[in-house]
Every structure is written in C-alpha cells, then in structure tokens.
Amino acid sequence: QVQLVESGGGLVQAGGSLRLSCAASGNIFSINTMGWYRQAPGKQRDLVATITRLGMSAYADSVKGRFTISRDNAKNTVYLQMNSLKPEDAAVYYCYVRNALGTYEDWGQGTQVTVSS
C-alpha cells in the first residue's frame, strides 16, 4: 500500500501558474511510474502526465508545452508545473502511481485547481 499526499492546488487566473506536488510513502520500492490525472465535473478522469523512475515522461496533447512533470526519487515526490493555465484546465488533479508490471496502481485524494477567466 502506498500513501499519496498532494499539495499545491488553488485558484489562479487564466495565464497564471501553479505547481502541484505529491509525496509518496509506504510500500514505494515497487513504484515505477508516477504522474497526474485530472477530472472535471461531469467528465471522465483523464491522464495529464506521467514520468518513470528513469525520467521518461509523457503528456496529454492538451498540456504539451505548458505543463512540465518532474520527479525527485530521493524524496519520492512528483511535481507538476502548470504554466499558461486555461479555464479548461480546471479540475481535480489526482496523483497517480503504478508499479513496473502494471499490477498495482493507485490515486491520491485529489487537489482542486480552479482557473478563472
């Protein structure tokens, strides 16, 4: 079992920036991929970005060039730097972890990001 603690959400004006953090603890030795999903009201939870232990990252097309995912393996923490935020980026952002085999995955409790136009 892995515990995930997210922070950094909040209210920002369109064009602004926010940085999300997610610290993992517990049975973390098997975790390979960390990342972020988001879910807006009435919509499905969608992938935002992921990063592997070796630093390979992937992004949703909608955030490429604006969001940057990074990871500190020593701190078991993943970050999401979000720049040039748009109202459509508003959602609950969930931290995500998965082991290398894909047999275990989990999400954090979520942190709200609100973008005013």
Image (cartoon, rainbow, N blue to C red):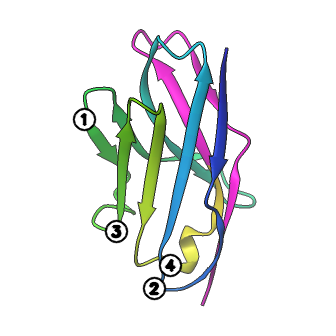
The residue tagged 1 is: 56
Magenta-colored segment: predominant secondary structure: strand
Magenta stretch encompasses residue 96: yes
The spot of residue 102 in percent (x, y) is 46, 14
Numbered badge on residue 86: 4
Mark earlier in primary sequence (4, 3): 3
Q: Amino acid at mark 4?
A: Lys
Q: Secondary structure at mark 1?
A: loop
> Residue sitting at 40 percent across and 73 percent down?
83
Mark earlier in primary sequence (3, 2): 2
Residue placed most toward the observer, 100 or 47: 100
Mark earlier in primary sequence (3, 1): 1
> Residue sitting at 41 percent across and 27 percent down?
33
Q: Amino acid at mark 2?
A: Gly
The residue tagged 3 is: 66
Q: Secondary structure at mark 2?
A: loop
Residue at the far front: name it.
74
Mark earlier in primary sequence (2, 4): 2
Task: Classify residue 113 by image quadrant.
Answer: bottom right
Quadrant of the image for the C terminus? bottom right
- Dot 4, crowdedness within 10 Å: few (<14), some or many (≥20)? many
